[in-house]
Amino acid sequence: MDIYCGNLSFRASSQDIEKLFENYGEVSSARVITDRETGRSRGFAIVVMSNDDEAQQAVDALNGNDFMGRNLVVNEARRKS
C-alpha cells in the first residue's frame, strides 16, 4: 500500500520518515518529495509498505500525531488521474 504522509516539517528526511513507519511494519520505501527547481522539501512524503494490514495500522496510529512539531496527515495515497 502506498501511504501519503503530509504536513511534514521541512527538516524531516526520508530516513526520519522510514524510521517512523518501521514501528508498524516493513517499509519498502520512504521518500520525502522535493521541489525539482530548489531541492527543498514540499512538505510531504510517499511511504510504501508491503503489508496492507501493517500499512493500515500505521495510517490509523500516525494520522493527526505530532512529529517534529507538526500534526501529520496520513492516509492511503491516491494516484492522480
Image (cartoon, helix red, strand yellow):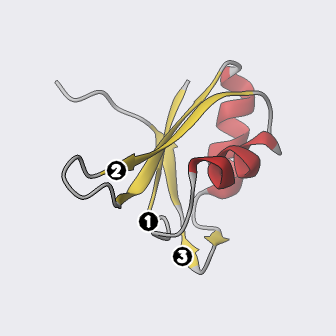
Judging by the rendered image, the residue that carries numbered circle 3 is 70
N-terminal of the pair, mark 2 or mark 3, is 2
Q: How far separated are the C-alphas under marks 2 and 3?
A: 18 Å
Q: Is mark 2 on a helix, strand or loop?
A: strand
Q: Could you tell me how far apart the alpha carbons at marks 1 and 2 are, in whole angstroms?
A: 13 Å
Q: Are marks 1 and 2 in contact (CB under 8 Å)?
A: no
Q: In which quarter of the image is the N terminus?
A: top right
Residue 80 at x, y percent in the picture: 21, 29
The answer for how far apart the CA atoms under marks 1 and 3 are is: 7 Å
Q: List x then y, in percent, for residue 12.
A: 56, 63
**Toward the viewer: 5 or 18?**
18
Is residue 6 found left or right of 16 in the rendered image?
left
Q: Do the residues labelled 1 and 3 touch (CB within 8 Å)?
A: yes
Q: Which of marks 2 and 3 is in front?
A: 2
How many other residues sit within 10 Å of disc 2, few (<14), some (14-19) or many (≥20)? Answer: some
What residue is pinned by disc 2?
34
Q: What residue type is labelled 2?
A: Thr
User: What residue lies at 52% left-to-right and 51% top-to-bottom?
Assistant: 74
5 vs 69, left or right, is left
**Horizontal and vertical percent position of residue 60:** 66, 49
Q: Relative to residue 59, is residue 51 depicted above or below?
A: above
Mark 1 falls on what kind of element? loop
Mark nearer the N terminus (1 vs 2): 1
* Residue that badge 1 annotates: 7
Q: What residue type is labelled 3?
A: Arg
Rendering quarter of residue 6: bottom left
Q: Are marks 2 and 3 in contact (CB under 8 Å)?
A: no
Residue shown at 66% from the left, 56% from the top:
62
User: In this view of the protein, which residue sits in the foreground, 26 or 73?
Assistant: 26
